[in-house]
């Protein structure tokens, strides 16, 4: 888990960070829509789960934006060299468990790790919260494929210091000749602004169109 410490005194967001870090709820959220038309066909042609495919493209986009790799640890802001996925995966009994899927330059390798985690979750019970699934160098991903949501909030424990971004995906739906998927991003306002979320969304869409 390679990381570097930011020099907050030289950071152009120093005052923003100090201001929002005092909030009981420092997170803000944005909803957006992703065009999945090309990505869905590519996932099927490569015989890869569409969930794994868009999870991978989203994680690639997160790694492109440094602010998504920032975390607050012991009063310092650190930037991880690389971040991974901690996604909820459902079981046949309708419960879910947490996973940890390491990032890879290879989509196929990422998909293999995701399949291993899915099998482990299906063969377990409970949340499966552990040192791996709770790692700070991960993004919390959630998929809600039953609902085409237009707004979303998260359960939060304000006693627990948290600075990990949370990204959610909704139900894919048709609009004209396009396949769209509503999504949401919740991030710590001390670490980024709407501009940085916009960078992520643009990168995500570009990867889905690639």
Image (cartoon, helix red, strand yellow):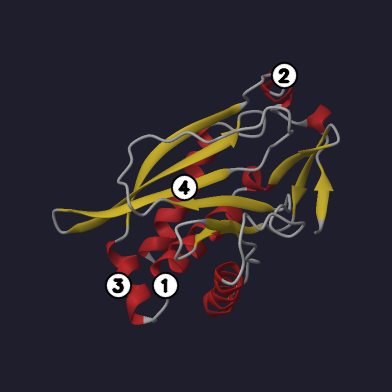
Reading the chain from its start, which is encountered first: label 4 or label 3? Answer: 3
- Packing grade of label 1 (10 A; few <14, some 14-19, many >=20) is some
Who is closer to the viewer here, 70 or 15? 70
The Cα atoms of the two marked residues, 4 and 3, are separated by 21 Å
Going 39% across and 81% down the picture, which residue do you hit? 46
Instruction: Provide the secondary structure element on which disc 4 rests.
Output: strand
Percent x, y of residue 145: 36, 54
Locate residue 32: give its quadrant: top left
Image point (33%, 37%), residue name: 150
Q: Nearer the viewer, mark 4 or mark 3?
A: 4
Write down the residue under mark 1.
Answer: 49
**Residue on which disc 4 sits:** 168
* Secondary structure found at label 1: loop
Q: Specify the label residue 171 is tagged with.
A: none
Q: CA distance from mark 3 to mark 2?
A: 45 Å
Would you name the residue on which mark 2 appears? 22
Q: Earlier in the sequence, mark 4 or mark 2?
A: 2
Sequence-earlier tag: 1 or 2: 2
- Circle 2 SS class: loop
Out of 99 and 196, give the one closest to the viewer.
99
Looking at this view, is 21 or 3 the one in front? Answer: 21
Q: Please tell me how crowded label 2 is: few (under 14), some (14-19), or many (20+) other residues with Cα within 10 Å.
A: few
Q: Which of the two discs, 3 and 2, labels the residue nearer the N terminus?
A: 2
Mark-to-mark CA distance, 4 and 2: 26 Å
Front disc: 3 or 1? 1
Residue under label 3: 41
Q: Which quadrant does the C terminus fall into? A: bottom left
Q: Residue at x 66, y 34 (%)?
A: 191
Q: Is residue 116 above or below residue 188?
A: below
């Amino acid at each position: 888990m390679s990381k570097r410490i930011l020099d907050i005194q030289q950071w152009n967001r120093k005052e923003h960070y100090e201001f929002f870090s005092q909030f009981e709820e420092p997170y803000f959220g944005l909803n957006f829509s992703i065009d999945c038309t090309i990505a869905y066909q590519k996932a099927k042609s490569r015989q890869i789960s569409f969930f794994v495919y868009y999870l991978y493209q989203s994680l690639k986009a997160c790694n492109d934006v440094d602010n998504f790799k920032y975390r607050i640890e012991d009063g310092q802001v650190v930037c991880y060299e690389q971040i991974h996925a901690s996604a909820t995966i459902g079981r046949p009994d309708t419960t879910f468990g947490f996973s940890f899927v390491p990032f890879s330059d290879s989509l196929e390798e990422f998909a293999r790790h995701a399949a291993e985690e899915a099998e482990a979750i299906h063969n377990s019970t409970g949340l499966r919260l552990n040192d791996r699934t709770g790692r700070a160098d991960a993004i919390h991903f959630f998929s809600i494929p039953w609902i085409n949501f237009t707004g979303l909030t998260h359960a939060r424990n304000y006693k627990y210091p948290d600075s990990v971004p949370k990204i959610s995906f909704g139900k894919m739906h048709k609009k004209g000749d396009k396949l769209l998927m509503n999504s949401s991003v919740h991030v710590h306002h001390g670490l980024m602004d709407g501009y940085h979320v916009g960078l992520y969304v643009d990168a995500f869409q570009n990867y889905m169109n690639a």
